[in-house]
Amino acid sequence: MTGKRCLTILLGFFVLASAPACAPRAATVGSTPAQPAQISIQVNNTLGQAVNVYVNVNGTETLLRQVAANSNVTVPVPGYPPGTTATLKAVTFDGARTYSRTNVTLSGTYSFQVP
């Protein structure tokens, strides 16, 4: 083989080997996974003092947050799927009074009036 012919073959091989790198790539299209529905409690505290708001599911009580006196707050309830049955409880800051709602089905936003 002559040098010119060898160079032509090597050049042809290089062009063929690099062709796939220049080809357009297939795009992968996907969507964001569906987010679970957000559950929250709309707490309307009309008392003259703050209350601690709890959710109790299957005997496990979780403090959600403290709600100030004479205020209206939306409190998220993370970690529970829609349709969960719970007991909601509000305890005055001094611990003297407790207000509760039993057999609440958590779905969307539930309104919890205190007292």
Image: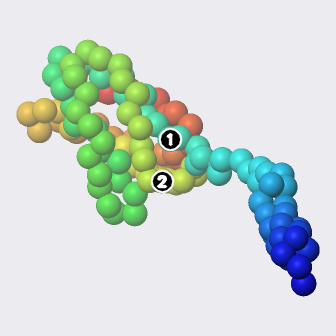
Residue projecting furthest to the left: 94
Above or below residue 81? Residue 75 is above
Q: Residue at x 42, y 47 (%)?
A: 78
Residue count near mark 1 (Cα–Cα under 10 Å), binned few <14, some 14–19, many ≥20: many
Residues tagged 2 and 1 counted as in contact (Cβ below 8 A): yes
Circle number at residue 20: none
Q: Which residue is drawn at 17% across and 17% down?
A: 48
Mark 1 falls on what kind of element? loop
Say which residue label 1 marks. Answer: 39
Q: Which residue is drawn at 89% across and 79% down?
A: 2
Residue projecting furthest to the front: 2
Type of amino acid under label 1? Ile
Q: How many marks on residues?
A: 2
Residue 109 in the image: state x and y as whole percent: 52, 33
Which quadrant of the structure image shows residue 13? bottom right
Horizontal side, residue 107 vs residue 49: left or right: right
Of callouts 2 and 1, the N-terminal one: 1
Image quarter of the C terminus:
top left
The reply to whether residue 80 is in sight is yes
Mark 2 falls on what kind of element? loop
Horizontal side, residue 110 vs residue 10: left or right: left
Above or below residue 110? Residue 73 is above
Horizontal side, residue 42 vs residue 54: left or right: right
Which quadrant of the structure image shows residue 70? top left
Q: Which residue is drawn at 30% across and 22% down?
A: 45
Above or below residue 110? Residue 36 is below
Circle number at residue 80: 2
Pick the front one: 39 or 32: 32
Which quadrant of the structure image shows residue 75? top left
Horizontal side, residue 21 vs residue 112: left or right: right
